[in-house]
Amino acid sequence: MGLGAFRTGLTDDIINVAGTVPMTGYFKNAGQTLREGIEAKINYKLDRWNAYANYTYVNAIYQSAITLSSPFDPFANAAGNIFVAPGDHIPAIPPTASRPGSSTRSPMHGSSASTST
């Protein structure tokens, strides 16, 4: 069993921004960002069998106000911009993740097999 916490603050984080032509984009500095959360794991072993589960919670937020070009986003203004305020969540970073799995070890030749979702 294990439990951990993390807090990572970045300055000049680089993000991908949508371009004005569909399927294009560019990179831009996003100012300051913060990722903080917890990670937990549990592990159970019995003879050759091992079962485990991992869980992560992350709060990923902008800490700087920035303007992002996103002309095809339904939440953009008429000029195609999205205004990001400190405290807004960073997209594409899921707030939670979990992963259960199991493995077994063969008594012959030390081979093993595992599954996870």
Image: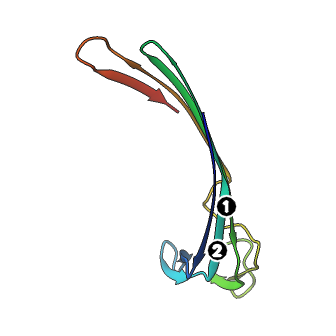
Q: In which quarter of the image is residue 78?
A: bottom right
Q: x and y percent of residue 3 in the render?
A: 63, 43
> On residue 36, which mark appears?
1
Name the image quarter holding residue 104.
Answer: top left
**Residue 31 screen position, x and y as percent:** 62, 83
At numbered mark 2, what does the secondary structure look like: helix, strand or loop?
strand
Regarding mark 1 in the picture, which secondary structure is present there? strand
Question: 111 and 77: which one is in front?
Answer: 111
Q: Residue furthest bottom?
A: 79
The relative height of residue 20 versus residue 41 in the rendered view (above or below) is below
At 28% from the left and 21% from the top, the residue drawn is: 111
Q: What is the three-letter code of the residue carrying label 1?
A: Glu
Which is more toward the observer, 94 or 112?
Answer: 112
Task: Kindly identify the residue that appears in the image at 70 percent across and 88 percent down.
Answer: 79
Which residue is more in the foreground, 16 or 5? 5
Question: Relative to residue 111, is residue 68 depicted above or below?
Answer: below
Q: How is the image coloured?
A: rainbow
- At 47% from the left edge and 76% from the top edge, which residue is drawn? 24
Q: Position of residue 107 (x, y in %)?
A: 30, 11
* Residue 53 can be seen, yes or no: yes
Distance between mark 1 and mark 2 Cα atoms: 10 Å
Question: Which residue reaches farthest left?
Answer: 109
Residue 33 is labelled as 2
Q: Nearer the viewer, mark 1 or mark 2?
A: 1
With respect to residue 56, does 64 lie above or below? below
Dot 1 alpha-carbon crowd within 10 angstroms: few under 14, some 14 to 19, many 20 or more: some
